[in-house]
Each structure stands twice: as structure tokens, then as C-alpha cells.
Image: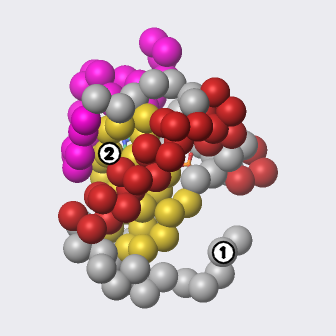
Amino acid sequence: MDDCLFCRIIRGEIPSAKVYEDDRVYAFRDINPQAPVHVLVVPKAHYKNVSDCAGKDPGLTGYVFKACTDIARAEGLENGFRLTTNNGPDACQSVEHMHVHILGGAKLTDKMG
Ligand code: DGP
């Protein structure tokens, strides 16, 4: 996806604060953090959201979530963290490349919506 923002970040065409990378996922700090730790974890392959990824490659979807838990541990979030993935317009997904938000580093609100 030539013009996808997160594909461009993965390729290094747009700078990002990288947290983790392997052959299947890339993780970087959110440009507009909503918590002391706010990391985005994305599959390197382009899927427009988690529904798209889960439907076409459920193994990769699981791999992304496993990576999230490993990154949360590495970020020192032993006391808890939240994983959020916005899926489609009603969820206010703003970038159409599947991504999971890792939020933590403080007590988060109990409001989920
Ligand atoms: P969502 O609303 O779930 O689609 O989240 C998209 C997130 O992407 C949002 O929290 C802000 C972040 N974001 C948008 N553009 C950039 C960027 O250029 N760099 C980084 N690091 N994050 C970005």
C-alpha cells in the first residue's frame, strides 16, 4: 500500500519512535499519547482493520496480540495495561491499517466508550 501512513512508517519513509520490530510486526510510540505509555503495534502486512486481518490471517492476528503482551512487559506495565483496536467508522478508526493501542503507565479510566 504505497500511500498508507502506517505502511510508510514501517518502510521508514516517515520517522517514528520504534519500540519493537520483527519480521511480522512493527511497534512505535503514538504521536498523540493518551497515557504515559502509548504504543501502536501493527502487522507489517497491510490489513485495513482487525476484522480484515482476522478474516484473512487469524494466525497473524494472534501474533500481533502476543507481541502486544511482550511489549507491555518490556515497557514495565506489570500493574496492568489496556489493548484497544478501533475497527471502522463507528469506532473512530482514523488510520486504515490494523493497529492495536497499548495504553498504560497510570491508572486508566474505567469508562470504555
Ligand atoms: P485510531 O484512531 O485507532 O485509528 O488511531 C490512530 C493513531 O495513530 C492515533 O492515536 C494517532 C496515531 N498517529 C497518526 N499519525 C501518526 C504518525 O504519523 N505517527 C505516529 N507515531 N502516530 C500517528
| Three-letter code for the amino acid on which mark 2 is drawn | Ala
Q: Secondary structure at mark 1?
A: loop
- The residue closer to the viewer here, 52 or 110, is 52
Residue 80 drawn above or below residue 55: below
Instruction: Residue at 37% x, 23% y: name it.
Output: 8
Residue 111 left/right relative to 103 = right
Q: Which image quarter: residue 12?
A: top left
Q: Which residue is mark 2?
A: 27
Q: Is mark 2 within 8 Å of ligand 1?
A: no
Of the residues under marks 2 and 1, which one precedes in the sequence? 2
Residue 18 falls within the magenta-colored stretch:
yes
Residue 43 left/right relative to 21 = right
Q: Position of residue 27 (x, y in %)?
A: 32, 45
Instruction: Residue at 45% x, 25% y: name it.
Output: 45
Residue 23 drawn above or below residue 42: above
Q: Which residues are magenta?
A: 1-22
| Three-letter code for the amino acid on which mark 1 is drawn | Met
Outermost residue toward the right in this view: 90
Q: Which image quarter: residue 25?
A: top left
Q: Position of residue 13 (x, y in %)?
A: 28, 22
State the scheme by which the image is colored.
Answer: secondary structure
Cα–Cα span, label 2 and label 1 = 23 Å
Q: Which residue is mark 1?
A: 112
**Badge 1: residue crowd in 10 Å (few <14, some 14–19, many ≥20):** few
Residue 94 falls within the magenta-colored stretch:
no
Residue 94 left/right relative to 89 = left
Count how many numbered circles sit on residues in the image. 2
Residue 20 drawn above or below residue 12: below
Q: Secondary structure at mark 2?
A: strand
